[in-house]
Image (spheres, grey):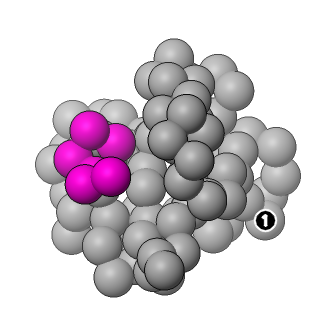
């Protein structure tokens, strides 16, 4: 079974629908709100600062959430519609 982490924020308009998608499809996932704690933010930034998947997002001046991390970074995607459920 895949381990899924959804990084998001209560202030992000796209994060709510992503959470609803996972819940509505009975997908087990951990939701980490990057605006709730520094620990959540640091965990997100570890991926954002080191992974090439974020390059175009950073160049566009965007944050990169919602961010779906699968199996501790084996795969990172930004659109939950890309998941095969």
- Identify the residue at horizontal 22%, vertical 63% (top origin): 53
Q: Which residue is mark 1?
A: 39
Front-lying residue, 9 or 81 = 81
Q: Nearer the viewer, residue 51 or 66?
A: 66
Q: Is residue 82 left or right of residue 30?
A: left
- Residue 66 visible in the displayed image: yes
Q: Secondary structure at mark 1?
A: helix
- From the viewer's perspective, is residue 68 above or below residue 80? below
Q: To which quarter of the image does residue 60 belong?
A: top left
Quadrant of residue 57 in the image?
Answer: top left
**Residue at the spot x=48%, y=80% of the render?**
1
Q: Residue furthest right?
A: 37
Please state the horizontal and vertical placement of residue 51, each as a whole percent of the image: 30, 73
Picture layout, residue 22 above or below residue 5 = above
Examine the image and state in which quarter residue 80 appears.
top left
Q: Is residue 45 above or below residue 8?
A: below
Point out the stretch of residues depicted in magenta: 80-85
Asked whether residue 82 is drawn in magenta, I would say: yes
- Residue at the limit of the structure toward the left, as seen here: 56
Classify mark 1: residues with Cα within 10 Å, few (<14), some (14-19) or many (20+): few
At horizontal 60% and vertical 39% (from top left) the residue drawn is 23
**Image coords of residue 32 (percent x, y):** 69, 53
Q: Is residue 67 magenta?
A: no
Q: Position of residue 31 (x, y in %)?
A: 67, 51
Question: Residue 71, image x and y in percent?
Answer: 45, 80
Residue at image position (25%, 54%) is 84
């Amino acid at each position: 079974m895949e381990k899924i982490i959804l990084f998001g924020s209560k202030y992000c308009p796209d994060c709510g629908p992503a959470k609803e998608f996972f819940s509505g499809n009975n997908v087990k996932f951990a939701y980490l709100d990057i605006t709730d704690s520094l620990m959540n933010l640091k965990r997100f930034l570890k991926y954002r600062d080191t992974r090439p998947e974020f390059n175009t997002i950073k160049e566009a001046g965007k944050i990169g959430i919602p961010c779906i991390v699968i199996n501790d970074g084996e795969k990172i995607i930004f659109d939950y519609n890309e998941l095969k459920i």
